[in-house]
Amino acid sequence: MTVKFESKIIILFLLIGTLFSCTSKKNLIYLQSDGQQIAASVANFEPVLQSDDVVMIVVSAENPEIAAPYNMIQSNSGTLGGQDQLQSYLIDKEGNVDFPMLGKIKLAGLTRLNAIQKMKTLLENHIKEPIVNLRILNFKISVLGEVGRPGIYPIQSERITFLEALSLSGDLSIYGKRKNIMIIREKDGVKTIDKVDITKSDFINSPYYYLAQNDVIYVEPNKTKINSSVFGPNIGIAFSLVSLLITVITLTTR
């Protein structure tokens, strides 16, 4: 075997080795603290109501008959089961709901607790000690990219952390970038795009640790995934064949 041929073989192995080089654990492990204690801020997260949110509002009182006019009932007599349900309310583009007896009430921009307090204040002119229950019915988040199960996920609790969302979607694949995850969020009708690094432990104090309704998470593919897509899915088989060929040539030229 000539020196020139041996040099080509070495260069080939170096190129393939670079392509499949080991990824540092710093690029894979979540919430790394380097032995330092990270104090998490007290979580008082409350979702903020937005236009296009669908909410259920239930008014109660000591005398149910007094509260009844404030609870619209939607008849489902033509559906399977035939059970009536409380009417839901869509927050319109101006941020209002059209509530029975009270008219238009602006709720967009308020937290759930603030919206309840506003409703109670308005109702106190009509009902003694009213009780208001308010819930967002269409709270959902979307997870896309390098995760096990990309998709749209309805959230029942109105409160979910970023890591819980990743868990729902089957976690990041080995090819997902941990240091540059995109979050698309809408506030007051304006969409913003930000990046988060979940390898850092101080991420738990990020404004994106708790997700808002309709947040979209996108996990970009890392360099290894991009390179493998360029060379094709059968690069591993090709590498094995090249190795076998080199071995045969080495043995036959000695």
Image (tube, rainbow, N blue to C red):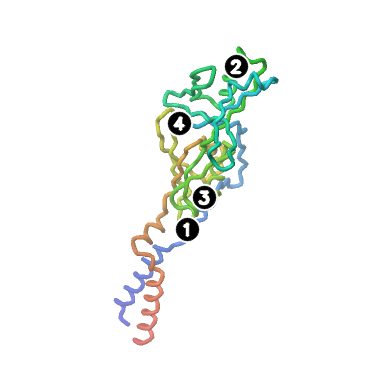
Q: Type of residue at label 1? A: Thr
Label 2 vs 1, first from the N-terminus: 1
Q: CA distance from mark 4 to mark 2?
A: 24 Å
User: Of helix, strand and loop, which one carries label 1?
Assistant: loop
Question: Residue 120's spot in the image, x, y percent?
Answer: 61, 19
**Disc 4: which residue:** 52
Q: CA distance from mark 3 to mark 4?
A: 25 Å
**Disc 1: which residue:** 23
**Disc 2: which residue:** 123
**Disc 3: which residue:** 169
Q: Are marks 2 and 3 in contact (CB under 8 Å)?
A: no
Which-is-in-front pick, marks 4 and 2?
Answer: 2
Label 1 packing within 10 angstroms: few (<14), some (14-19), many (20+): few
Q: Are marks 2 and 1 in contact (CB under 8 Å)?
A: no
Which-is-in-front pick, marks 2 and 1?
Answer: 2
Q: Please, is residue 136 above or below residue 126 in the view?
A: below
Label 4 packing within 10 angstroms: few (<14), some (14-19), many (20+): some
Label 2 vs 3, first from the N-terminus: 2
